[in-house]
Image: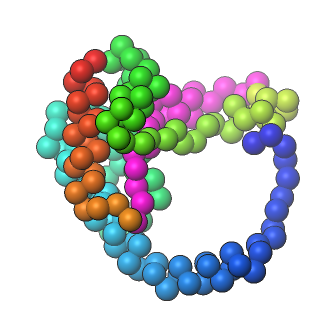
Amino acid sequence: MQALGFNYRLPDINCALGVAQLQRLADFAAKRKRLVRAYQDALAAQNLPVRWTPTRDDVVFHLFAVSIDFEALGTTRSVVMQGLKNRGVGSQVHYIPVNRHPYWQQHALAQRELPGADTHYRNTLSLPLFADMADDDPARVIAALSEVLNGL
């Protein structure tokens, strides 16, 4: 975040797309739940130094983020991300703690220590999760993650 601001405008075309997508919401939610369960099953079958959030029937995951103590493994998140990329798997970093955003660096929050947020940010890696993934993609992603982590 570079500056504080608000944007409440939503163009008509985006509204129309949103209404059309709402008709598919139940299918999207069911698919995401299956994919998250597949991720968790694949992770449970491996002996990896990775933690994840358990599923709940009333929750649809937006992201599938795992926690890895990269420092304890003697590596960095960037090295793991590059290893995944080399195996055809994209990954992301979500989310930068609020007090680390440029806008807040110029304000009071920059001086505030948020050790829990910093630890979470330092150890979190988001793996692919989207409705068009194939049901066997989570197993492929975890196999790639296993190769990367075991190759360190």
Confirm whether residue 80 shows in the render. Answer: yes
* Near-viewer residue (113 or 70): 70
Q: Which residue is drawn at 45% across and 53% down?
A: 63
Q: How many labels does the image show?
A: 0
What colour scheme governs how the chains and residues are painted in the rendered image of this protein? rainbow
Span shown in magenta: 111-131
Q: x, y (%) of residue 111?
A: 76, 24
* Near-viewer residue (120 or 131): 131
Q: Which quadrant, please, contains the C terminus?
A: top left
Q: Residue at x 25, y 62 (%)?
A: 135
Q: Magenta stretch: residue 120 in it? A: yes
| 137 sits to left or right of 74 | left
Q: Residue at x 85, y 32 (%)?
A: 107
| 18 sits to left or right of 75 | right
In the image, residue 66 above or below residue 34: above
Confirm whether residue 116 shows in the render. Answer: no
| 76 sits to left or right of 47 | right
Q: Magenta stretch: residue 138 in it? A: no
Q: x, y (%) of residue 3?
A: 84, 43
| 118 sits to left or right of 69 | right
* Near-viewer residue (120 or 115): 120
Q: x, y (%) of residue 32?
A: 36, 65
Asked which quadrant contains residue 75, the reply is top left
Q: x, y (%) of residue 56?
A: 33, 63
Asked which quadrant contains residue 8, the reply is bottom right
* Near-viewer residue (51 or 143): 143
Q: Which residue appears farthest toward the left when viewing the image?
A: 45
Q: Which quadrant, please, contains the N terminus?
A: top right
